[in-house]
Image (cartoon, rainbow, N blue to C red):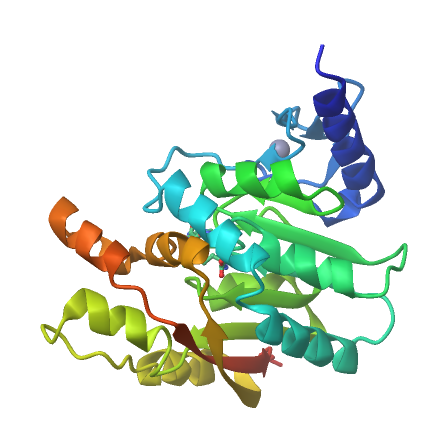
Amino acid sequence: MDIKRTKKIDRARGLVKTKQYLFKCPICSGQMFIDDHKSLACHNNHSFDFSKKGYLNLLTAANSPSYSRELFAARHQVCLAGFYDPLIDKLIEIINAHFPDNKAVLDAGCGEGSHIYDIYRKTQEKSDNVFAGADISKDSINIAASNNADIIWCVADLAKLPFLDKTFDIVLNILSPANYSEFQRILHDEGRIIKVVPGPQYLRELRGIIYQGEKTVDYSNREVVKYFRHKLNLVDTYDIQYEFAVHDELWPHLIKMTPLIWGSSEEKLIDILNTKVPQITVDLMILTGMKKLLD
Ligand SMILES: C[S@@+](CC[C@H](N)C(=O)[O-])C[C@H]1O[C@@H](n2cnc3c(N)ncnc32)[C@H](O)[C@@H]1O
Ligand SMILES: [Zn+2]
């Protein structure tokens, strides 16, 4: 028997048991608890097992996620290299400014999990803190749970989150699709939604190499920001811009971590792999918003 695996699943069960009050049954919307079989269940006997890695799959319908395991594995290497560190530090500053003591944080669309794990790791540990990550891709949550314990990991659709109303202080949504109605439902009235979107120069060197003049290199986030303002009360925006020095070993991972190369031929991919650049521009915008309360 693989002792390490057994430990992981038990650790995850223990963690979820202390936070079971967060969960809503994805089938009947009832409250959930860890039952005698050590599964997460509701009073209508809808039951969800923990995977060996320690995550919960709370999807009720099959889906075919658009991102590959390879993309998440590449993203993981890029995160480990510190590519997003200045962003993470700013997010921690914002989170701590609003919630200096205990906080419940969900990363909705967390991918391979490094962002929420880094926030957890760098945030002073408090026993009542909650850190959770949800993503529709089983491959991504598998990587997340393999690498990082101490976070509640769920395979779930952000359009139908398996959490009760008003359970989180912060919903993070980093470079991922959003569902603002659902985010507002699970957020406390004083909570914050923190969304990260690419700025116009994000990965511009990579775009330049891949598109080679076929398309415009700049990206516009105007519509995304407009929609955020329409759905939420926009509180603040922050621009994060820096250059990241790229080591040779990181280059293939950087190329494979985004959908930008999708559609490129094998030949073009080899070309891109051979066209290394010394540094890559990171240009991100953080939007913070509060609920639009109806009454
Ligand atoms: C570009 S990746 C970003 C992942 C991560 N936030 C990061 O910055 O590395 C977009 C993520 O959104 C997830 N996603 C897309 N649609 C989703 C949905 N309906 N529910 C949950 N996650 C979703 C994808 O599986 C993917 O992990
Ligand atoms: Zn149920």
Q: Is residue 165 visible?
A: no
Quarter holding ligand 1: bottom left
Q: In which quarter of the image is residue 55?
A: top right
Q: In which quarter of the image is residue 246?
A: bottom left
Q: Residue at x 35, y 73 (%)?
A: 203
Q: Where is residue 285 in the image (x, y as percent from the top left)?
A: 48, 82
Name the one closer to the observer, 213 or 237. 213
Q: Where is residue 293 in the image (x, y as percent from the top left)?
A: 60, 79
Q: Where is residue 102 in the image (x, y as percent from the top left)?
A: 85, 66
Q: Residue furthest left?
A: 214
Name the one closer to the observer, 72 or 32. 72
Q: Which residue lies furthest to the right in this view?
A: 127
Q: In which quarter of the image is residue 165?
A: bottom right
Q: On the picture, is 106 further left or further right than 157?
A: right
Number of marks in picture: 0
Look at the picture and state if 59 lies above or below 95: above
The quadrant of the picture occupied by the N terminus is: top right
Q: Can residue 93 be seen in this view?
A: yes
Name the one closer to the observer, 107 or 200. 200
Q: Residue furthest top?
A: 1
The quadrant of the picture occupied by the C terminus is: bottom right
Q: Where is residue 220 in the image (x, y as percent from the top left)?
A: 29, 82
Q: On the picture, is 251 further left or further right than 3?
A: left
Look at the picture and state if 225 lies above or below 115: below
Look at the picture and state if 124 lies above or below 45: below
Name the one closer to the observer, 224 or 93. 93
